Structures are given as C-alpha cells and as structure tokens.
Image (tube, rainbow, N blue to C red):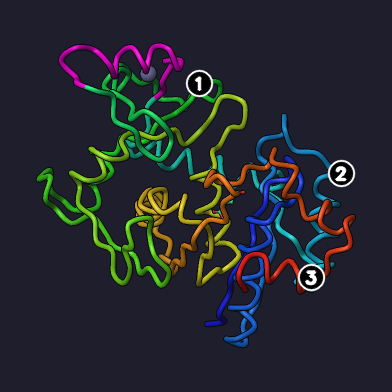
Amino acid sequence: MIFKTRFAPSPTGPLHLGHAYSAMLAHDLARSEDGQFLLRIEDIDQSRSRPHWEEQIYDDLRWLGLRWPESVMRQSDRLAVYDRALDDLWARGLLYPCTCNRKDIAAAASAPQEGAPLHGPDGIIYPGTCRGKRRDTQRPTDIPLRLDMAAAGRVLTGSAQPGAKVGSFHESGAGPNGETGTIPFSLGELTDTIGDVVLSRRDMGTSYHLSVVLDDAAQGITHVVRGQDLFEATHIHVVLRALLGLPTPQYLHHRLIRDDVGKRLAKRDDARAISKYRAEGASPADIRAMVGL
Ligand code: GLU
Ligand code: ZN
C-alpha cells in the first residue's frame, strides 16, 4: 500500500498560515515516507466556492514548493457517489429527515429538563426531535438528513449498551487534550458527545462528513493530516467508514496556528493570508519558520 496524505482545502477564501502549515506537514510526511501527497478541492458549498480562490490556492501551494499529481479530485464532480451512499444508509434505516431550524434546535436543547445544551463537533448536539417520525420509502432529497447515531452504533456493535465499543482509530499526532495512540470510543460517547449529525444538507445534497469519508477512501489516503479542531469529527468519520465498509486510515491531528490573541485563524482572517506575506516579500522559508517547521 502506498503511503498517501492529502490536503483538502475549500476554495472559499485565501490560503492562510494555518492551511499552509497543514499542507506542508502532509506534504513533508508523504515525502519522508516515499509516498504521495494528493490534493482535493472541497467545493460542495457552491454558494461560497469561487474559481479565483481555487487558482490562488494552487498558486500559493506551488510557491511554497509543494508538488502533487495533476489529477486533483473535486467534490462537485462526485455528487453521484454521495447520492449512492445516502441511498444505502437510507435503505438501512440509518437516516431520518429533519426539518428543525437552528432556533428549534436551540429551544429543544435548552428545555428545562435538558439542562445546559451540550455542544458537539457541529454545534449544539441535536436533541432528536425528528428521530422516529414517519419515514417515506423514498429518500427525500430536499430535506436535511441526519444519521441516527444510536442506530448506527447498534449496527456496528450489535449491542445497545452505552459502554459497547463502537470503534477506534490510530492517532499519531494528538487530540486537543493530548489524546494519542489508539483511541477507542463507545456507543454512549457517540450519542452523548456527538449525536445525530447532518449527513445531507438541503443546499448541498451531502455534507462535509459524508464527502470527506468517501473521498479519502476513493483517493486511497492512508494518513489523514489535519487540524486538532477536527479531532472530534474523526469519530463521526470512523463510524461512517465502518458503516460504508471502508477501511479506516491513520490520523495525525496537528496543533492549530493561532493568532496573537490565541484565536484560531479563520479564512476571513485575511491578515494571515499567504498572498499577503508574499506581497510583503516573505520567502517560503519564512513561512515555514513562522509556523515552526
Ligand atoms: N475542507 C476542509 C477544511 O478546509 C478539510 C478538512 C479535512 O482535512 O478533513 O477544513
Ligand atoms: Zn428535526
């Protein structure tokens, strides 16, 4: 098996220092293992993706000295693949339509008997309002679909016990609390700390979680290198992989590059755009030094 890493930017803004760090780590790791570094354009959010951002990403990555095979995977070409996976999960009774908006979810999650609303990787943990409502035989394509996490866990463990071990992954970096090595997780952890995440958004017909899993598998990625902010989401990805019969890669979650006040860098943080450093005369070596490489 060829050692493969990837960088999977969304072309919705400039490449900033945090992205550059992630891309260089994945690139360097593949090089050091005599493997391959692949690129994937995560453009399922067509309302925010722009061709000029994509061009800028290629240009900045090349300037940083990164090289990748010419065939770049593009999520917007793969909607049929996402559809098939959703059909499969739907047919197995693992998805349900959800018509709640943010306000409904916040209200249901903060009902007096619920205590303070808990947050998971995608925000407030869905309180399950629409779970168990009648489902049509046909999968609806114009309503968000959620994964029934308890049902998924039961499929994977054959048990409904909260302590049942659902899966594990190998972490060669570290999670936000220093988690490293083999990370096992239980059914109860999934339902209590993640909940029923959306797998198909109304406007996209898929979601980050579903697409990233199918695409990493299709590209044969053996080592997923990305920021610690996605450590919790990795649990969702391991579950989806198992449900869809896909092998689990290894994961390397890296520290986040923060700005001076300790905030995580966001794409709108144009002050940290690679293009800005370039315009100011920085060299690729300066960028590497800035992120501690
Ligand atoms: N497109 C995602 C991002 O920009 C990729 C996340 C991942 O590497 O899985 O954050
Ligand atoms: Zn709902």
Give SS at disc 1.
loop
Q: Which residues are magenta?
A: 97-115
Q: How far is the residue under mark 3 from the one under mark 2?
A: 22 Å
Q: Are marks 3 and 2 in contact (CB under 8 Å)?
A: no
Q: How far is the residue under mark 2 from the one under mark 1?
A: 31 Å
Residue 52, numbered label:
2
Residue 143, numbered label:
1
Residue 98's spot in the image, x, y percent?
41, 20
Relative horizontal placement of residue 99, taking residue 225 as reference (left or right): left
Residue 6's spot in the image, x, y percent?
62, 65
Q: Amino acid at mark 1?
A: Ile
Which part of the image, by quadrant, shows the C terminus?
bottom right
Would you identify the image quadrant in which residue 2 lies?
Answer: bottom right
In the depicted structure, whether residue 140 falls above or below residue 83: above
Q: Which residue is mark 3?
A: 284
Sequence-first tag of 3 and 2: 2
